[in-house]
Amino acid sequence: MSETKALLILHGKQALNEEVREAVIKQRELGWDLAVRITWEPGDAQRLVLEALEAGYPTLIAGGGDGTLREVAMAMLEANTTATLALVPLGSANDFARAAGVPLDPFEALALLDEPARAIDVGEMNGQPFVNMATGGFGSQVTASTSEDLKRVLGGGAYLLTGLSRFADIHSARGRFSGPGFEWEGEFLALGIGNGRQAGGGQLLCPQATIDDGLLDVCIVPAPADAVGTLGTLLSGGLLGVDAVSVSARVPWLEVEAPTPIDINLDGEPLTGARLRFAVRTGALRVHLPADSPLLSRNAEPQ
């Protein structure tokens, strides 16, 4: 089996993307046997992953945003495959790709196929995986309520605009958080459980997170009297940033108990829950990333 054989699973909205088409053609001219399949409806990504694995593809490529990356990664995890994963970032925010240093240009992103794959962690909430981040509270409501039309026009800035327009809807949640060496309980406005570093169109919630350390970075934004001012700092990425208003920790697992269900967003998928357990699947995926990716530990070795 040729190691230069890969299958690109492309989000249906990108089917007519000429940049992607040209990038695929150039990659084929460089010797890659690169096939393309398009998603059309929910469940297609999982089906296409299984078909690709049955056909013997050693490398799969997620062509889309953070949600597409999660769908492809989930299917690979369920299949317990040794195949490697690459990413062509084509979403409105591309939070994981931006933090990882994956080029936004499709041809440059495909060039990472020539980089050795590296084992990365995957987070999970109640057994459901996420590659980038789980967010909770007001931030997850903003992500879930931002329209596709607005994202198409403004990209990551759509989340900021939606957040600013929804200040009147701000309300806090309450939770009790516990993990190894960490306890916190109280009202909070926003929550980030990071395998990666940013979410919601560039909001840097876990700036020190790495994806190969076996740990999750926790960011909790307590609810102060000036809720609007605090959310303004968060959403606008002010000079002081999240660090000025947050409680943080780094843990291998975290349990959350809440009197009422908390809104949670896993890499774009909205969920709710009152009893949540977050954990890490260490080295669960082998991904083609830049050798100098900020998300990799300095001592990371190719796998």
Image (cartoon, grey):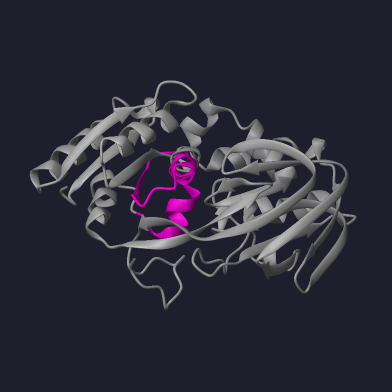
Q: Nearer the viewer, residue 268 or 84?
A: 84
Q: How many marks?
A: 0
128 is higher (above) or lower (below) than 186: above
Magenta residues? 73-102
Q: Is residue 37 left or right of residue 235?
A: left
Q: Is residue 91 left or right of residue 204?
A: left
Q: Position of residue 150 (x, y in %)?
A: 54, 30
Q: Is residue 218 magenta?
A: no
Q: Residue at x 68, y 55 (%)?
A: 278
Whether residue 57 appears in this view of the structure is yes
Q: Nearer the viewer, residue 125 or 260?
A: 125
Q: Position of residue 111 (x, y in %)?
A: 23, 53
Q: Is residue 91 left or right of residue 161?
A: left
155 is higher (above) or lower (below) than 136: above
Q: Position of residue 45 (x, y in %)?
A: 42, 31
Q: Is residue 101 magenta?
A: yes
